[in-house]
Amino acid sequence: MRKIALLWATVLLLSCGEEKKILLPKADVTLVKQVDDLSTIDMFFKVENNDTMADVNKSTVITTTNWVFNIDKRLPLNTIVPEIIKLQEKKRKKSKGETATTQNYFSYADSIGKNLAFVSFTNTQYKLEQPKDGIIVFIDKKDRVFVNDSLVQRKDLQQFIVNHNRDLQPVHYCFDQKMSYGNYLLNRLFLNSIEHKKVSFDEFVY
């Protein structure tokens, strides 16, 4: 029987006597403290032939439950986003014609509560391309923020978007494909604090 031990900052899995470990991102923001009726999807950090890969364990996932993605913070986005897209599509096809009631969450370590916390990405549609219109907010792998190619300080981002989007174009959040998942999660939590009515559900990774 597979046992899952949820430790602060680490997800430790014991299966058939083999120990595997996922290093989770840490953040001092708590959005969701608890998720019930869940299945976990685990993405381990793996290096093979000098290439970084996501070792995905989805053997226990159940379509009708909430999905919690435990992802190693060292994995770059270009290794995990294609897997996330495939899993989201699988869930949508299974629930087609039904009222969607389950959620998808990323897990992370809450450095304040010293336990797991979660952020929902149920409505996010990932795209492996650049947006073709609108206000483009791009965060590179060094965590610099650009809005339509202009470098912007984080503290000024919300006002900058307001000042440059008087005609209410869609605002697209975009990320460097080489960014680590750990940095992505922290940037996503930061962007959750930015209030704007026209933020797109699409997120772009390129």
Image (tube, rainbow, N blue to C red):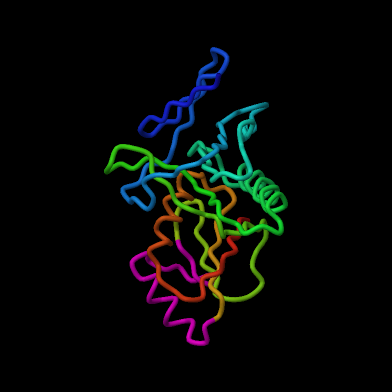
Q: Is residue 153 magenta?
A: yes
Q: For this rendering, which residue is in front, 95 or 72? A: 95
In the picture shown, does residue 52 fall above or below 31? Answer: above
Residue 7 lies in what quarter of the image? top left
In this orientation, which residue lies closer to the viewer: 11 or 54?
Answer: 11
Q: What number of labels is visible?
A: 0
Expressed as whole percent of the image width and height from the top left, the position of residue 61 reads 61, 37
Residue occupying the far top of the picture: 17
Q: Is residue 12 above or below residue 101?
A: above
- Look at the picture and state if 186 lies above or below 40: below
Q: Report if residue 61 is visible in the image.
A: yes
Percent coordinates x, y for residue 174 in the rendering = 55, 61
Residue 205 placement: quadrant: bottom right
Residue 52, visible in the rendered structure = no
- Residue 33 at x, y percent in the picture: 36, 46
Residue situated in front as seen by the camera: 119 or 35: 35
Q: Quadrant of the C terminus?
A: bottom right
Residue 141: x %, y % from top left = 50, 51
